[in-house]
Image (cartoon, rainbow, N blue to C red):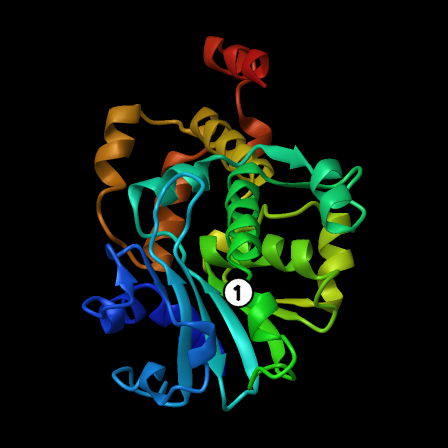
Amino acid sequence: HFVPHSVHIYHKIGHAVHDHPLCVHNATFAIPIDSLNDDRFYLKSIHGQESTKLIFASFLIGIHATVYAILADEVAKAIVISVRGTLSLEDVVVDLQCLPQELSEVGRKCDFEGSGHYCHSGILSRGKWMYEDIRKRRILHEVFSRGSPYENYDLVIVGHSLGAGCACILATMIRHKYPRLRCFAFEPPGCVYDEALCNFSESFITSFVRHDDIVPRLAPANADALRDEFFELLARVKIPKFKLFRDIRDIVNDDDLSRRNLAVLRATESTPRDTQYYQQLLTFR
């Protein structure tokens, strides 16, 4: 049910409010809190979202700032925070900031045990920015306040790809205030949290991985393993490298690929280990 929310934040929500008087400098859109019952703010121009109301949206883009929207889904009876994934150059820079950052400080601030736990540093910076942006605007406070038409709604956070990672950290940061919240992360990066924190968050975060998508499998350890396997494979090549790189440009079926590999690669146990290349490889490792 929540997949469309994670998709429409890429383009359609921005297009729906682009020329609206409440869209300030194409950077933010916010309806007055006393207009939560106003029927004019349904996303009627987006197919399937006729019963979803746009409450707030930020279209700011930066290393810390990220595009997100707060919606009232009247079918699911949920307030939905939808976070956009990778689309801009700034998003790519954040993706690459994958060094782990310790969560003690964030844990103390947000009332969870962060000591000894780690998060993707780029994703963490965006999660912290969203947390502060939502807090200072008091959006959730007003939406769930007594007398609001949405005071008894659930809180759901969704995102795709990079947005899924940001949704996870935001969910962890605000869960102490909204213990019933759920987070649905579609194709999240594979290096958002350490394993222990992933296990802890199972009770409120659900991740979805489709087939062989590479993004959920991206992690520094996997990148290191791929690099080492590639260099090890080069050591097994028994024909001139220029001929190999010329041949691998040809697309072949599985049977022909197996035969070609036998023709150009030594068996692993037959790899010469006294060559200059192999000694450099050992030093590099």
Task: Name the residue at 71% across, 54% down.
Answer: 198
Task: Name the residue at 33% across, 54% down.
Answer: 256
* 133 is higher (above) or lower (below) than 35: above
Q: Is residue 147 left or right of residue 23?
A: right
Question: Which image quadrant for residue 119?
Answer: top right
Task: Name the residue at 34% across, 47% down.
Answer: 61
**SS at badge 1:** helix
Q: Is residue 134 left or right of residue 21?
A: right
User: Which of the pair 39/246 is nearer the observer?
Assistant: 39
Question: Which image quadrant for residue 200?
Answer: bottom right
Q: Is residue 140 left or right of residue 227?
A: right
* 141 is higher (above) or lower (below) than 252: below
Q: Position of residue 151 (x, y in %)?
A: 62, 81
Quarter placement of the C terminus: top right
Q: Which residue is mark 1?
A: 139
User: Which of the pair 113/221 is nearer the observer?
Assistant: 113
Q: Position of residue 181 (x, y in %)?
A: 67, 71
Tell me if I can see residue 214 in this picture: no
Q: Amino acid at mark 1?
A: Ile
